[in-house]
Image (tube, grey):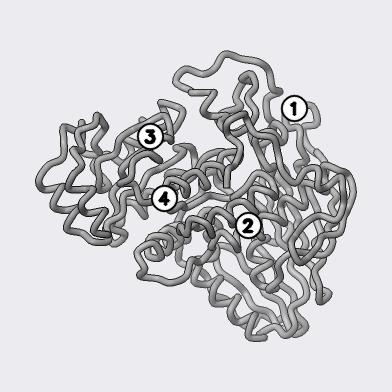
Amino acid sequence: MSTNRRQFVRNMAFSAAGIGLGGIASGFTAKSYSRIVGANDRLNIALMGCGRRVSAYYAALKDKNNNVDVAYICDVMKKQREKVGKDLSGKVSGKATLVNDIHDVWNDKSVDAIFNATPDHWHAPGTWMAMQAGKHVYIEKPCSQNPREGELLVAFQKKYGKVVQMGNQQRSAKESQEIIAAIHSGIIGDVYKAVAFYSNNRGEVPVEKKAPIPEGLDWELWQGPAPHQEYTDNTWDYNWHWYGWHWGTAETGNNATHELDVARWALQVNYPEHVDVEAAKRHFKNDGWVMYDTMDASFRFSGNKIIQWDGKSRSGYNTYGSDRGTVIYGSEGTVFVNREGYTLYDRMGKKVKSSKSSGTEAGTALGGGGDMTDTHVANFFNVIRGKETKLNSPIEEGAISQMMCHYANISYRIGKSFNVNSANGHILDKDGMKLWSREYEKGWEPKL
């Protein structure tokens, strides 16, 4: 903790109304005061977004080795922030104030870091505004709603020098780190291809219709940086994922980020040279899901390397023997890797080695969470403190992996394949570049 920070804490009255995690806050006790100012590396953190993903952080927040205080629980839906407050009451350190408006968090100089688990359209704007307010950020995938936001995130991080970890937590898995290092050392020869996949059995989605704004929801703030529109039934909770491109990034942005990141990591590639996609809505054709639910995408890179994405949102058949994972091909063997570990095969297809995780990281369950997330969060905290020197998924790496998802979505939307400038990632197609960015609600435009 810096001298200025210690002085700030000493001078704070800490008498604002709030919900303490041990009950109603009535000021700052001598015991809690001495605990914070005496712990040089204690971090004050805030939770931004209290939907399905937030519970994945609980174990890390409860872990005393992480040495954090939960200062704020923020969500635009009253019942969600109250639920998280109740979940964490008496189980984590800190006096958490429950707030509706994230601006209250940004304006508090005592907050060190924010966990951004909002809907997709809030991820990048919420992160760069947090950096502008002096906060480090753990940003969930997808880190951006469009390609330009990925560029902006990297630029904001360089300008403000904050620690920004993207939540593609498999980068923190011991087994994944082990086998990727072995691949880089030549264990399967010259690596030339990876197939990333995901299979889920999502059901029907209601057709959108105008409806009253749910009680307790700040609809205007939920929309935030996206151009505002009237509320439609069931949008705020989860189905915004499938109701078009205004909010979300479809299944590819929602989930392919993880496996495409592993594929890119294994092949040691950045931007592709060519993108080709076949995608369509194949299931429940009259329901409210307006995007594709099935996609095959190919990304061709220099050096004759290729990454393929096989995404099935509403077909639970496990084509590759698992609901998600990555198969990596080399001239002398093959590797299958997922959240449960890896299996190494020689060129003849004989199993050479298998390493299975003893952890609990979820596969396709909503919200997820488990040991990979716990380790990923700890890495974030330790880099902030200087106890570790390297983030496992810094935003400049995460943004490139996210770009592959954007390429796939854009190719689907314009109905054609395209070439990419592999030096800067820009699409070499005028129709594709029309979707490079988005419009923002007036007053929410990014200001770098």
The amino acid sitting under disc 1 is Asp
Classify residue 94 by image quadrant.
top left
The amino acid sitting under disc 2 is Ala
Horizontal side of residue 123 vs 27, given as left or right: right
Mark 1 vs mark 3, CA separation in Å? 39 Å
Question: Residue sitting at 80 percent across and 69 percent down?
Answer: 301
The residue lying furthest to the left in this view is 30
Q: Earlier in the sequence, mark 1 or mark 3?
A: 3
Confirm whether residue 62 shows in the render.
no
Mark 3 neighbour class, 10 Å CA radius: few under 14, some 14 to 19, many 20 or more? few
Residue ID for mark 2: 399
Q: Earlier in the sequence, mark 2 or mark 4?
A: 4
Q: Which mark is residue 135?
A: 4
Mark 4 vs mark 3, CA separation in Å? 13 Å
Q: Earlier in the sequence, mark 1 or mark 2?
A: 1
Task: Say which element carries label 1.
Answer: loop
Residue ID for mark 3: 104
Question: Residue sitting at 66 percent across and 80 percent down?
Answer: 351
Q: Which mark is residue 287?
A: 1
Task: Say which element carries label 4.
Answer: loop
Q: Earlier in the sequence, mark 4 or mark 3?
A: 3
Horizontal side of residue 155 vs 60, given as left or right: right
* Residue in the foreground of this view, choosing between 182 and 31: 31
Confirm whether residue 217 shows in the render.
yes
Question: Residue sitting at 72 percent across and 27 percent down?
Answer: 288
Task: Please state which of the two labelled residues, at mark 1 or mark 2, is closer to the viewer.
Answer: 2
Q: Are marks 2 and 4 in contact (CB under 8 Å)?
A: no
Task: Please state which of the two labelled residues, at mark 4 or mark 1, is closer to the viewer.
Answer: 4
Vertical placement of residue 314 versus 4, above or below: above
Vertical placement of residue 23 versus 372, above or below: above
The amino acid sitting under disc 4 is Lys
